[in-house]
Image (spheres, rainbow, N blue to C red):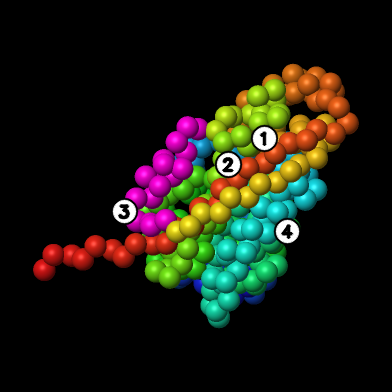
Amino acid sequence: MVPASLAALVCPVCRSPFAADSTGRSLLCPDGHSFDAAKQGYFNFLTGKGTVFEADSPDMVAARFDFLSAGHYRGLAESVADLAAPLLARPGAAVLDAGTGTGHYLRAVLDRAPAAAVGLDISKFALRRAARLNPEALNVVSDVWQRLPLPNDAVDVIMVVFAPRNAAEFARVLRPSGRLIVVTPREGHLAEVAGRTGMLGIEPAKDERLSASLAGRFGARPAQDVDLALDLSPADVANLALMGPAGHHVDRGALAALVASLPARTAVAARFRISVFEPLPEPAQPE
């Protein structure tokens, strides 16, 4: 366990700083709360009633891992790393990957700029993969809509790649000089296969809703569009359909039948937008 990463966490029960035991397999706080690492290396911070949200299932996680491991979205990961790495160059820098999934995007950032790192997701199945891929990070099961297990002003970069955004908590844990990096799909993303495989469509006015959800806490900086030309096998197409939110309800039998009818290769266009936001100063309090 990396001490620098440990400093980026607090106890989800009492908000006290953590210390690790001599094995690095348990996190302990001064008030006696203890969290043991799962055998795969992640920590489960869901307390009380846990979360009301449905976590990604094992087959959804396996599909995402296989698709990303094949390098299809490597260009996107490198673009995210290009934006994040300069912000992590100083000693003591830290990054939060909110909705880390299998950890592939965080891996690209840490390869470019080693830093203290926290990977957060509600799926223990995803974090099993992430903990193996990013052993130097602290990988934590936690709900982004609850109070994050980080102190105020704890990180220099927050990455959110196809994941929910809690503006209030992000503003609390991001340092004033930090940046929030958000990846969303653009119109036409995966259009060649999305409809046939049951993937969810792109919401209208998505950019406007993103900005509105962060208004008052974050100001927008220039965004970057990333377009990738994918050459996919039938198995790749199946993984695409299963790895996203549609994987919760897609008919596996119908998908298998469709995949069996596909040609050996399918050309697909992936279209992303990387939006960057900076925290706004807190309004002055009246005297």
Marks 4, 1: nearer the viewer = 1
| Label 2 crowd (10 A; few <14 / some 14-19 / many >=20) | many
Do the residues bearing badges 2 and 3 touch, measured as CB atoms within 8 Å?
no
The amino acid at mark 1 is: Leu
Sequence-wise first label, 2 or 1: 2
Do the residues bearing badges 2 and 1 touch, measured as CB atoms within 8 Å?
yes
Mark 2 secondary-structure assignment: strand
Q: Can residue 200 be seen from the camera position used here? A: yes
Sequence-wise first label, 4 or 2: 4
> Compared with residue 40, is residue 194 higher up or lower down, i.e. above or below?
above
User: Was residue 216 drawn as part of the magenta stretch in this picture?
Assistant: yes
Q: Residue at x 54, y 71 (%)?
A: 87
> Compared with residue 272, is residue 113 higher up or lower down, i.e. above or below?
below
Residue that extends furthest to the right in the rendered view of this protein? 264
Distance between the Cα atoms at labels 4 and 2?
25 Å
Sequence-wise first label, 3 or 4: 4
Which image quarter is the N terminus in? Answer: bottom right
Mark 4 secondary-structure assignment: helix
Residue 252: image quadrant is top right
Q: Which residues are magenta?
A: 203-220
Residue 206 position in % (x across, y down): 47, 38
